[in-house]
Image (cartoon, grey):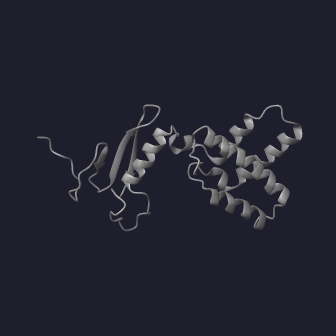
Amino acid sequence: MSEKRRDNRNRILREGEYQRSDGRYWFRYIDEDGKKKNVYRWRLDKNGPMPKGKKRELSLTEREKQIEADLFDHIVTNGGNYTVLELVEKYMSLKTGVRHNTVAGYKTVINVLKKEAFGRQRIDKVRLSDAKAWLIKLQQMDGRGYSSIHSIRGVLRPAIQMAVDDDLIGPDS
C-alpha cells in the first residue's frame, strides 16, 4: 500500500505539492512552453497561519487554481514578463501608416512612461485602480492638462486591450 505524502501539520499533499524543510510549500507545474515552473508560498490553504514578518499573499492552493485556470484559458503566466512601457512600445510598433503628428504623440507617451515608476511595473501586477490612480497623479501632482492625460489614456487603454486579446493578461486584470 502506497504511503501518502504529508506536511509537518499532517495534511495530505496533492500531486505537485511539496513542503520544504523551512516550512514553505511549493508547487511544480509545466507551463505552455513545456518548461517546469515552481511557485512558493508560506501557507498551504487560505486558513493556514502566516509566519510573522511575511507579506500576506494567496495560499498555495489558491495560486494553484489561478495557474490551472490560466493554463486552461491559454493565458501566458506573468504576463510574458512585459512591463507597461514594453507593452506600449509593442503596441506602437504594430501601428503602421499613422501620421507624423500621431507618432510624435506616441513618443510623448513613451517618454512619460519612461520617467514614471508605473511604466516599470509588470502588466500582470497592474490593476485598473492602479492605472486610474496614476492618471490622477499625473493631473494633480505633476500638473498635466486634460489633453495630455487624454492622449496617454488613449494609448494605454488599447495597449492593455491588446494584452488581453493576446492572452498576456486575463480580462479581469
Seen in the picture, residue 23 relative to 78 is either above or below; the reply is below
Count of marks, rendered view: 0
Residue toward you, 107 or 133: 133
Tell whether 8 sits left or right of 118.
left
The location of residue 36, given as percent across then percent down, is 39, 36
Image point 51% across, 37% down: which residue?
74
Residue 127 in which image quadrant: bottom right
Q: Quadrant of the N terminus?
A: top left
User: Residue 156, image x and y in percent?
Assistant: 72, 48
Q: Position of residue 149 (x, y in %)?
A: 79, 56
Quarter holding residue 134? bottom right
Image check: 3 left or right of 111? left
Q: Is residue 157 above or below residue 34?
A: below
Question: What residue is shown at x 48% (from left), y 43% (from top)?
Answer: 70
- Please state the horizontal and vertical placement of residue 84, each as a whole percent of the image: 65, 48
Q: Residue at x 81, y 65 (%)?
A: 143
